[in-house]
Image (tube, rainbow, N blue to C red):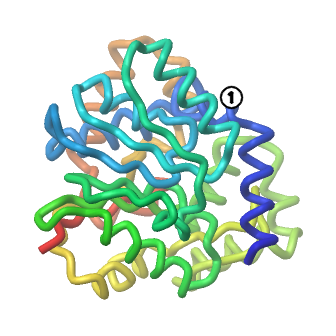
Amino acid sequence: MKENIETVRQYYNRGAEHEWDRLGSRHPVEFLLTTWMMDKYVRPGDAILDIGGGPGRYSIHYAQKGCAVTLAELSEANVDLARRKAAEAGVSLTAYAQNCLELEDLGLGQYDHVFLMGPLYHLTDEADRVRAVEIALRHLKPGGKLYVSFIMVFARVIYDLQNAGHIAADCADPNTAAIIQAAASGQDYGGPDFTTAYFYHQRNILPFMERFGLEKLRFFGQEGILAPNEPQLLERDAAEFEQWIALAKKYLELPEFLSWSEHAMYIGRKP
C-alpha cells in the first residue's frame, strides 16, 4: 500500500501543470458539467473540504464563489500549484499536503460539503476505499453533502476512441486488455494503468455507496454523452459547443448513458 501511494504521489508531483490543464484546455467538459451539477447545492459562505483535489480546479472555483475552502491533497507539487493559482485568482485557499487516509492528523473540523474526487481512482483495496469514504464522512456536518467521483472501466475504450492508434496495443497488453474485458463482463478493475488505479463498472458504484447510509441526491456521468467525441467538439465553434453542453445536461442522469462518460459522480446527503 505504501508503495502504491508513493507511486501516485510521484506521478502527480511530476505533472502538476499537466493535471491543472486536464480540466482546462484539454478536458473542459468534465469540469463544466460537474460544476453545473454541484452548483445546485453549494452556496456562497459554505465550508468545503476538497480531499484529493489535485492542483485545486474545484477548490478555486468555489473559493471564487465565496466559499471557505480547505484542500487536502497527496501531491506536494499539486498543493504548491493550487496555492499559486489561488493567489493569481485573488482568493483565499487553505491547502495541506496529506494522504486522504491520514486526515485525522490535521485536526480538521466538519464542513458543509466534502469533495472526494480523486482518491478512489487510486485505492485498489476495497478496505481503503471504504475507509476513505468513512473519513470523508467524519468531516461532514449532519445534513452536509458528499461528492464522490469514480473512473469507469469503459474509460479505456473511450480513450482509444478519442486517440487513434492505441486500440491494438491496448488489446494486446494484459493490463489494459483486462480493463476492456471488465467493461464487457460487468466487473471492476484494479491494477497498473496511468498509476496503480481502480476502475469501476457503472453498475457497481451505487451498491458500493449504499453501505454508508447516505441519501442519494444525484448519480451522473461527469462528461455526459460527450466524452467519446470531446476532441472533435473542442475544434467546433463556440455556439455549437455550447449547444452540445446544453444537450448533454438533459441526458446527464440517465443510467443508460452512464458508460458514455469516463468519470461518474455520486452526490449524497449525510443524515
Q: Residue at x 30, y 41 (%)?
A: 248
Residue on which disc 1 sits:
17
What crowding class fits label 1: few (fewer than 14 Cα within 10 Å), some (14-19), or many (20 or more)?
A: some
238 on left or right of 216: right
The answer to whether residue 260 is visible is no
Q: Position of residue 222 (x, y in %)?
A: 39, 49
**Quadrant containing the C terminus in the rendered view:** bottom left
Q: Residue at x 48, y 58 (%)?
A: 106
Location of residue 144 (image quadrant): bottom left
Residue type marked 1 = Glu
Q: Residue at x 28, y 84 (%)?
A: 210
Does 48 appear above or below 263?
A: above
Does 2 appear above or below 251?
A: below
45 on left or right of 257: left
Q: Residue at x 59, y 34 (%)?
A: 22
Does 46 appear above or below 90?
A: below
Q: Secondary structure at mark 1?
A: helix
**Quadrant containing the N terminus in the rendered view:** bottom right
Q: Position of residue 42 (x, y in %)?
A: 18, 42
142 on left or right of 161: left
Q: Position of residue 161 (x, y in %)?
A: 65, 48
